[in-house]
Image (cartoon, helix red, strand yellow):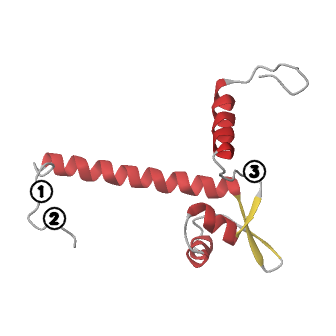
Amino acid sequence: MSGPDGTKRVIPARLYDTLTFIMDSLCEGQGVTVMHTSAQLTTQKAADFLQMSRPTLVKLLESGEIPFTKVGRHRRVLLADVQEYEERISARRDQFLADQTREAAQEGDYFVVPDDYKTR
């Protein structure tokens, strides 16, 4: 990669892919946010990241699903903890789907379409 002043730097492939994604997004008029994983998020920002309501996120915090700290009376969540929760939920979902698929295949129901398959 060449800088504006002509200096050249070698960029690892993993970082190159990320920078290419960021550049493409910006060229398409999309906003991009880059944050350090140790960044503290408000409950609203964390809820937005997880695409859920703030009250739902607060329930997860209070139940111990996601660690948090309090600054005065305000909760703060580390981005790394929010990402870890997202990965944990995704892994649970993937495992559930794999289990359901395996069970349906074992019972011979995997390719059977029920008569009432229409939902509306």
Name the residue at 34% across, 54% down: 96
Give the residue pinned by disc 1.
113
Helix, strand or loop at label 3? It is: loop
Name the residue at 69% across, 35% down: 19
Task: Tell whether 43 sits left or right of 105.
Answer: right
Asked if the residue under mark 2 is in contact with the one under mark 3, i.e. CB atoms within 8 Å, the reply is: no
Q: Quadrant of residue 8?
A: top right
Task: Tell whether 70 sits left or right of 32.
Answer: right
Give the residue pinned by disc 3.
35
Residue type (three-letter) at the residue carrying disc 1: Val
Give the residue pinned by disc 2.
117
Helix, strand or loop at label 1? It is: loop
Q: Residue 79 placed where, x, y %? A: 69, 56
Q: CA distance from mark 2 to mark 1?
A: 7 Å
- The quarter of the image holding the C terminus is bottom left
Residue type (three-letter) at the residue carrying disc 2: Tyr
Report the front residue among 104 and 12.
12
Determine crowd level at label 3: few under 14, some 14-19, many 20+ residues with C-alpha closer than 10 A: few
Mark 3 or mark 2: whose residue is earlier in sequence: 3
